[in-house]
Amino acid sequence: MKFIDKKTIAEILVEHLSDLRTEEIEALLEIPPSEIDFTYAFPCFKIAKLKKKSPDIIAKELENEVKHTKFLVDVEAIGPYLNLKINPKYILDCIFEYKDDYGRIRDVIEKRKKGKLRIVIEYPSPNTNKPLHFGHIRNILLGKSLSNLLEYKGHDVFQVNLYNNRGIHICKSMLAYKKWGNNKEPDKKSDHFVGDFYVKYSEMAKKDEHLEEEAYKILRSWESGDEETLNLWKKMNNWAIEGFKDTFKKLDISFDKEYFESDLYLKGKEIILEGLRNNKFEKAEDGAIFVRLKERYNLPDKFLIRSDGTSIYITQDIYLAYKKKEDYNYDRSIYVVADEQNQHFKWLFAILDLLGFKEDNYHLSYGMISLPSGKMKSREGTVVDGDDVIEEVENLALIEVNKRYPNISESEKLRRAKIIGLAAVKFYILKYSATKGFVFKPDESISFEGETGPYIQYCYARIASIILKSGIEISNDINWDLLNHEHELFLMKQLAYFPEFIDSAEKTYNIHLIAQYLLTLCQVFNSFYSSCQVISDNRELEKARLLLIKCVQIVIKIGLNILGIETLDKM
RNA sequence: GGACCUAUAGCCUAGCCUGGAUAGGGCGUCGGACUUCUAAUCCGAAAGUCGCAGGUUCGAAUCCUGCUAGGUCCGCCA
């Protein structure tokens, strides 16, 4: 099976371009603007400089030199560009033969083992005093889809979660429960129940400044191991975590390992003291230990151990890095955390580097979600609740399903609404590049039209519907000359690019590239759909078009799988 | 005061790493397409000083410098 991509093209061109290496040519190759009916374009500016010749002339020379083959069916110079067209037969053949492996076809064909990594990815690491908000949803979707992508590309991925289950914020919820909870058991989703007490604390603390002192009293009694305090702490933490598990299940995430701050927060001190002995760190006059990072890392100094000898938050993260290495012997460790902690991770990685822990750490940072009224504040209850968003969007989807299919069973309506609603939320978040923060407008944010998850699902369902109705067995033994409509050619061209988008997303951790690719593919498909009838009296044409749309469906499915979005045959 | 991120039509956004063909999409607006495989769709139109000013280059949304605006961080909090 012949597979043709940029690399293949570069290998052909390098024969005629002695000044450049294959990899350089591959990097230069671009996808031409859509109106140009070629698969790839080689811009001749660089080579023109080297040869001190006009790029137009070089393109023309190449046009004459590069031979047409059954793979490379057309080569044409247009101005300074050499445009190349690959035979669409080989694109569809590859997809049809390799099916779900098409997105990683080069790896499969070359039986690639090299470059496979053991990767630990940590997310969403919530605090256990309040329910997950919309920011956590973004975190979870990024973490999950990146895990899917890396797994798809053959890496060993270990998903881990860290519960931030101790500290003053936890004690505040505990205090409120003690004072106003009447030993009540949860009468709602249990993480929300816990969160209510956090909000209650904040309300009451505004009026009563002694509350804070009381909360610290609980913290001290927790630290001294007071049994009553520990019991309450365990009870409330379990409620929070039980609630999270529900949400995790809805979003289809699970973890290879869960770490708890309460097990870690005292650890790491040894590492710091060792660093102090090795003169990596310094001791302040009052006994606190800190590190100077200005000169070597251009970062502010950072304290690591308090003057009373207790650990600071970052100390446990230092410990956890070693711990993960021990647990998983990873090649790379990824932290999915919002961009407000950018500096924290610069500190962490710098300190680890200083300690000689030369591992490949990566902070996958993403922009925070705010509301039209400003930043979300869980203390004040001005948050968009994760569970609420999911529920709301499922309800909206149910209304749409009802409108279109009033006669199907209620359970089927609910099933579809769930899948469509989740697709809407997931795609809405994943189509944007992660670095940008965004404003969540509750009333108008989630839609089912335009650049949305349901739009992609709709394409998939349309294809399923045609295939079902046709009933002809799909094969790649077709008359290839029949696929010559403008929209057909454009569609096949889009399909050719998919593995390269997967590679690019994997290399840069830019999940949104996959969503953006799917949008383009589906837009092209819908154009095709509206001008090319598949089911036809011309059985040869029908067979050819069936293969084409089957290939589109395969690619949509791979892409949506990575994004964690389910498909529907009917919607 | 210092560090980082962001700025692209009324609104949202891709492209920026690695400079290259007329800056792609979507929402909204206006006009059109369902007796034909699902109209959650498609076709067309109007709408852009790519924040501003310099610089590098044959060529800048993309690279460099300065500035402006917004966000985040700079704690012996987590």
Image (cartoon, coloured by chain):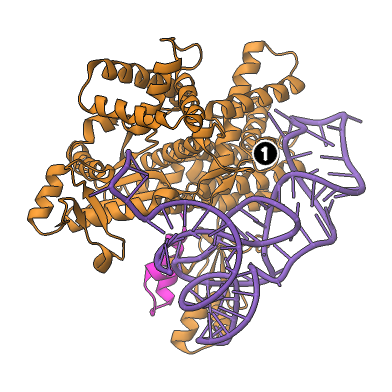
Residue A155 part of the magenta segment: no
State whether residue A20 is above or below residue A244.
below
Which chain is represented by purple in the image?
A: B
Which chain is represented by orange in the image?
A: A
Residue A545 left/right relative to A503:
right
* Residue type pointed to by label 1: Glu
State whether residue B59 is above or below residue A108.
below
> Where in the figure is residue A408, as x and y percent of width and height?
70, 13
User: Residue A373 occupies which quadrant of the picture?
Assistant: top right
Residue at image point 18% right, 42% down: A308
Residue A24 part of the magenta segment: yes
Residue A124 left/right relative to B58:
left
What range is drawn magenta here?
A: A1-25
State whether residue A336 is above or below residue A359.
above
Residue at image point 75% right, 16% down: A406
Residue on which disc 1 sits: A540
Circle 1 — which element? helix
State whether residue A311 is above or below residue A295.
above
